[in-house]
Amino acid sequence: MSLRHLLLTGLLTAAGLPASADALRIGWQQIVEPARVAQADGAYEAAIGEVEWKLFGGGADVIAAIAAGAIDIGYVGSSPLTAAASQGLPIQTIYVVGNIAEAEALAVKGIQTPEDLKGKKIATPFVSTAHYSLLTALKHWNIPAGQVQLLNLRPQEIAAAWERGDIDGAYIWDPVLNQIRTSGGTVLADSADVADWGGATFDAWIVRKDFAETHPDLVTAFVKVTGAATDAYLADPESWGADSPQAKQIAELTGAPAADVPGLLKGYHFAGLKDQTTPAFLGGETAQAIAATARFLETQGSAKALDDYAPYVNPAFAAAAQQ
């Protein structure tokens, strides 16, 4: 299935979502990251006012909801972000959560080497960073994607398929990744490996451009709260132990066991508020990373790379949030 078909399918689904004119509508995913604490303790509502949280199973669904006008701000990985930007969707990246490392991986059972993947059923959410990383890994191993049975499943569908024994492995993120690893799965490669092979990935918050232009103060407040939560973790990650209030809040929202949260957080290289405006992130390299992803997807026949992705990255809100 093409990226365009997947996004259109998701858009039609998202178009049925109820909208609220009074609340900031945020599309989130059950990713283990510091902003879950701010979400749990009401920090966003305290800074912004009414917030309507909409849970999505993957980045393609978030992009579709943005396109349909069903949400204002959404959490996505770099691959669906790239697909959306390449199709001209009017969005802007306003906060890079962090670079994905061990938090996403290819976990398998009964597979010892990359060559063993041929003919096996490997699941991943299409148009996700995991999907992009899987394709990058297969290319690195010189294995044509057509020689692997790639299945398009959302995270919870992957968890259920793994438990039933319907799949041989999955490229997925936590907490489902951790569930697979603790029930007999072994990691063949993770996204830190894939980054070394030229396929770095990241997670980010994006906003509808029209909403950002109309409500800059709300977007700035959102970025400030997100940055404060991330900075709190980066200042003292050891205090976010298994018995900490933060771990329990993250566990409640994501479904990950609280005991696993500290390890799962270490699977990312998070970026704080002041990092956002530097050349390493929104100040330059984020647009370059999107462009690199687009060029790869173009070689796969699933996207048309643009000449410039700078219009899809906006560090102004992070700069304002630092004032």
Image (tube, rainbow, N blue to C red):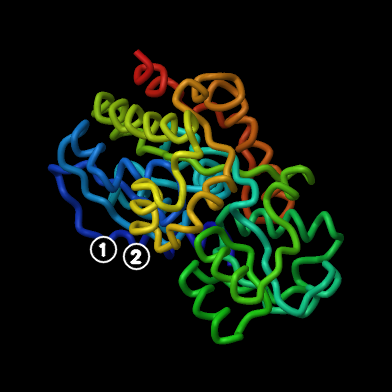
- Residue 27: image x %, image y %? 34, 50
Residue 291: mark: none
- x 31%, y 41%: residue: 38
| Left or right of residue 14, residue 139 in this image | right
Horizontally, residue 133 falls left or right of residue 236, namely right
Q: Which residue is mark 1?
A: 16
Q: In which image quadrant can residue 309 be found?
A: top right
Q: Are dots 1 and 2 in contact, CB under 8 Å?
A: yes
Q: Position of residue 248 (x, y in %)?
A: 36, 54
Q: Is residue 258 above or below residue 192?
A: below
| Most distant residue in the front direction | 243
- The residue shown at (49%, 67%) is 155
In the image, taking residue 118 as reference, residue 310 lies left or right, namely left
Q: On screen, 185 above or below 215?
A: below
Q: What amino acid type should be assigned to the residue bearing mark 1?
A: Gly
- Extreme residue in the left direction: 22
Q: Quadrant of the C terminus?
A: top left
Q: Nearer the viewer, residue 275 or 15?
A: 275
Report the amino acid beneath label 2.
Thr
| x and y percentages locating residue 253 in the rendered image | 34, 57
Name the residue that disc number 2 marks. Answer: 13
Picture residue at 44% right of the left edge, 29% below the top:
231
Direction from residue 322 to residue 122 in the image, left or right: right
The residue sitting at the top extreme is 323
